[in-house]
Amino acid sequence: MSKIGIDIEKAKQILQNGGLVAIPTETVYGLAANALDKDAVLKIFEVKNRPHFDPLIIHTNSLEKAKLWVTEFPKWAEKLANAFWPGPLTILLPKRNIPDIVTSGLEQVALRIPNHRLTLDLLEALDFPLAAPSANPFGYVSPTKPVHVSAQLQDKVDYIMDGGDCEVGIESTIVGMEDGKLCVFRLGGLAIEDIEKVAGKVEIRLNQSSNPKAPGMLKNHYAPKKPLVIGDIASLLKEHSSKKIGVISFKTDFGQKQQQVLSKKGDLSEAAHNLFSAIRTLDDSDVELIVAERFPDDLLGRAINDRLERAAAK
Ligand code: TXA
Ligand code: MG
């Protein structure tokens, strides 16, 4: 039987028996296990080669179910959940009945309801939530197509649910309450501007250190194998004229053999959708250096810049 498909019953059986299933979400593909089964969760860390201090997000398919895993679901969180779930928003809340391995021993759990029909149907069929990090080896770019998952993890997962291309293409935005303030801990697929329309001003607290509290924020977390530099593309092409260069641009055609224009019409959501796939394509090509331009610093441009900066950090 094929390892890739859309068989929800098969995925359910595997997960019930402690196996791993790659699941599509609107952001990126996840590597899922039964969040209440410590041994199954342990396999996620092993397969990804992920350090145990890096906690996992819990996925459910209803607010009611999400409430089972927290000691309280405060008003501010409910407001955000009602506005943006299912969707690319992860909320940090005080945990209840979730194994320590999932949260790396932290007091809070990260929760979200993803917006993908196949995965919502799977979650509906399960009587446990799914712990799922992005389905890539630790430190590499997140997968946004089934082929990205199979290329790197084919032998290590029991089944890959084929949900097509991820619509948003960039990981969820992570929010939580700190010092009485609503904070964004990871820029992602839900724009700050949209959150602020519902919740008022938010503070951006991205942890940049090398030993962060939220380790998804490690500086070089999205590193391709090839070196990547950010700046003015025309000058970078001149400066590195002796090298084979791959270009990542927002909307401009630089006439290069290896180039990825993320949105010809200049749409930041479309650019986010294409970003990780573009990085992978260039990383797998014969280029020696990837050069990317800085994106406008609003809407999803902020998350795109964040991922490019982390990819550039060595
Ligand atoms: O869009 C997404 O969020 C995707 C899909 C699959 O849902 N998941 C994802 O997971 O990006 P991952 O594991 O690659 O990144 C999750 C990050 C962690 O690295 C950490 O920074 C933060 O979420 N996180 C998870 N649990 C946390 C907790 N209890 N406290 C603080 N940060 C947490
Ligand atoms: Mg990840």
Image (spheres, grey):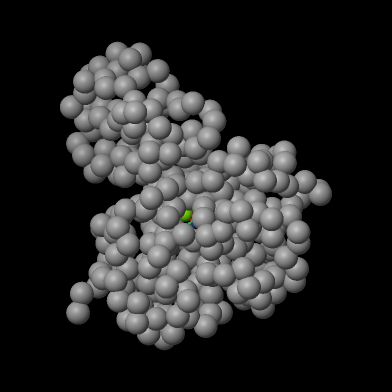
Image vertical order of residue 73 relative to residue 200, above or below: below
Q: Nearer the viewer, residue 264 or 49?
A: 264
Is 165 left or right of 88, judged from the image as shown? left
Q: Residue at the spot x=53%, y=80% of the render?
A: 128
Task: Residue lying at the far right in this picture: please name it.
Answer: 180
Q: Is residue 264 visible?
A: yes
Is 66 left or right of 228, judged from the image as shown? right
Q: Quadrant of residue 311?
A: top left
Image vertical order of residue 289 relative to residue 96, above or below: above
Residue 207 at what x, y percent from top left?
63, 43
Residue 17 at what x, y percent from top left?
41, 86
Residue 188 at what x, y percent from top left?
52, 45
Q: Nearer the viewer, residue 3 or 194?
A: 194
Image quadrant containing the N terminus: bottom left
Residue 209 at what x, y percent from top left?
62, 42
Q: Residue at the spot x=31%, y=44% of the render?
A: 277
Q: Nearer the viewer, residue 82 or 310?
A: 82
Q: Residue at the spot x=22%, y=27% of the render?
A: 244
Q: Is residue 41 visible?
A: no
Image vertical order of residue 291 relative to residue 7, above or below: above
Q: Quadrant of residue 194?
A: top right
Q: Residue at the spot x=56%, y=67% of the render?
A: 58
Query: How many numbered circles does the render carry?
Result: 0
